[in-house]
Image (cartoon, rainbow, N blue to C red):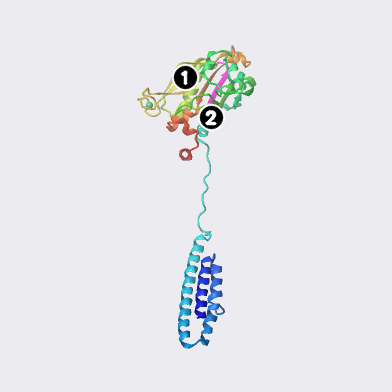
Amino acid sequence: MSLLDDVTKLETEVLERIGQADSLASLKELQVRYLGRKGPLTSLLRGLGSLPPEVRKQAGARANEVRKRLEAKFSEAVEKFSAEEKTSSFDPTLPGTCQQAGTAHILNQVMDEICSTFHGMGFEIARGPDVETDYYNFESLNFPPDHPARDMQDTFFVEGGRVLRTHTTPVQTRELEKRKPPIKIISPGAAYRNEAISTRAHASFHQVDGFLVDEGVTMADLKGALVAFCRAFFGEELKLKFRPSFFPFTEPSAEVDISCILCKGKGCQLCKYSGWLEILGCGMIDPAVLEITGHDPEKYTGYAFGMGVERVAMLKHKITDIRLLFNSNVRFLRQFF
Ligand SMILES: [Zn+2]
């Protein structure tokens, strides 16, 4: 019965090879090698003639059965590979995958918008270093070393007696030292204060400061510039309120409230039912600052103002938690693409 054994052995071998085939080409090669005219199965069938008739019948039936089964297996495997190759093949008529381009972070967008509004009003942009000297951060802005106003700003101190600037106002004295009036500057950038991080405060934040120095500048010019800016930025129907305040580098000083952009002054949760929102600080540049930077306070006057970019962005885009602006959550940021 060695012929029947050979057929069984051959069947096992071929089935195993089919299972191992890794491409349509190798499968077709196997089919020719095993089932072709010069293949082992054909030669086994040819050898049937030399067997006794009763054995021949049984062996012939078995060999044909195996051939049919192997042929079916081959066509099944060929079909599977053909389908796979069709789906994985490159189709040049399909449209390409679109790559999403990055955009500026919402804080940069708001900062750019604030700057371009002032730029349109004739202000030039100037920048200063984030690591600042005590002189520019405090002293030149009329904070003497033991002045209690320094307590308003919890400062990060850096080696060598320098500080992480607590506001962008130092750019004011840096530019005043270099230029001659008329000077009209806007300075955007980062500032740092040692504050506990909460929904409303962060240790790292951004400001835009601005100032103007010339002959005959009055508080009326300051009010005119800020009313024009706030209405261009938040809407023409906006109302503004100037409240007396204190900053060491301006005299008199004021804080500006705008009518609530959500309830239009009727009272809501955002404005804590007051109808007003604090938006910026401002004032007339203290004559001491002009004197320190080499300008005659009898001849020149000026105004200055500063605002927090996070606060402006949060009001404009109804963002309720300042931390959302810093935690790089793409799902949040994508709203502003
Ligand atoms: Zn409101």
Pick out the residue farthest to the left: 266
Q: Position of residue 198 (x, y in %)?
A: 46, 28
Q: Is residue 289 magenta?
A: no
| Mark 1 secondary-structure assignment | strand
Magenta-drawn segment: 208-216
Q: Is residue 169 left or right of residue 227?
A: right
- Precedes in sequence: disc 2 or disc 1: 2
Relative height, residue 37 to residue 101 (above, below): below
Q: Which mark is residue 177?
A: none
Question: What residue is disc 1 on?
Answer: 255
Q: Which mark lies nearer to you, 2 or 1? A: 1
Give the image quadrant in which the ligand numbered 1 is located: top left
**Disc 2 CB within 8 Å of nearest ligand 1 atom:** no
Separation of residues labelled 2 and 1 (CA atoms): 20 Å
Q: Residue at x 44, y 33 (%)?
A: 317
Q: Residue at x 45, y 27 (%)?
A: 200
Q: Residue at x 45, y 81 (%)?
A: 61
